Image: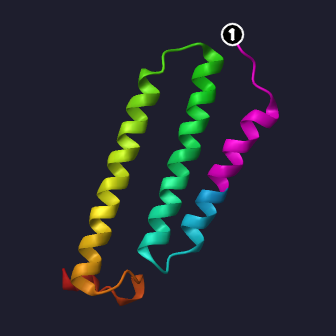
Amino acid sequence: MATLSLFTIAIPVFMLLCGLSSFVGSRKHLLSTLLSLEFIMLSIFWLMVLMVACLGGDSYFVLFFLTLAACEGALGLALLVSVVRTHGNDNFSSFMVLQC
């Protein structure tokens, strides 16, 4: 069983906090929001890999999480393409809530 140091855990947690601050702070374009969500998913994936390696568990759940993260990314890109085709850009300020 491997032991994890504080520095090893601090890197993905710092990545998670940076991704959350980017997600909350920049809401001008849909693409930057989707990129910050993918960064959050990557940091959570890294943290899960470290925890599973430390506990000596199976990595099937981590691969399942990675598959769901890839599906979430594909769905986000499809949404981005749909929004750009209907509205012409990905600015949040140009969206009308009642226009749907």
- Residue 59 % position (x, y): 48, 21
Residue 96: image location, x then y, percent? 28, 87
Residue that extends furthest to the bottom in the rendered view of this protein: 94
Relative horizontal placement of residue 20, taking residue 65 as reference (left or right): right
Point 42% across, 21% down: residue:
60
Q: How is the image coloured?
A: rainbow
Q: Residues within 10 Å of mark 1 (few under 14, many from 20)?
A: few
The location of residue 91, given as percent across then percent down, is 41, 84
Q: Is residue 71 above or below residue 83?
A: above
In this image, 16 relative to 62: left or right?
right
The amino acid on which the numbered mark 1 sits, given as a three-letter code, is: Met
- Decide which of 60, 22 is in the foreground and name it: 60
Q: Secondary structure at mark 1?
A: loop
> Which residue appears at 44% of the width and 63% of the height?
34
Image quadrant where residue 65 sits:
top left
- Give the vertical position of 47 relative to 42 (above or below): above
Q: Main secondary structure of the magenta part?
A: helix
Above or below, 11 relative to 76: above
Q: Residue at x 32, y 70 (%)?
A: 80
Q: Is residue 14 magenta?
A: yes
Residue at numbered disc 1: 1
Magenta range: 1-17
Looking at the rendering, in which quadrant would you find the N terminus?
top right
Q: Residue at x 35, y 85 (%)?
A: 89
Residue 54 image position (x, y, % from top left): 66, 19
Up the image or down, 66 lies above or below 56; here it is: below
The quarter of the picture where residue 97 lies is bottom left
Question: What is the quadrant of residue 63 in the picture?
Answer: top left
> In this rendering, would 51 be left or right of 29?
right
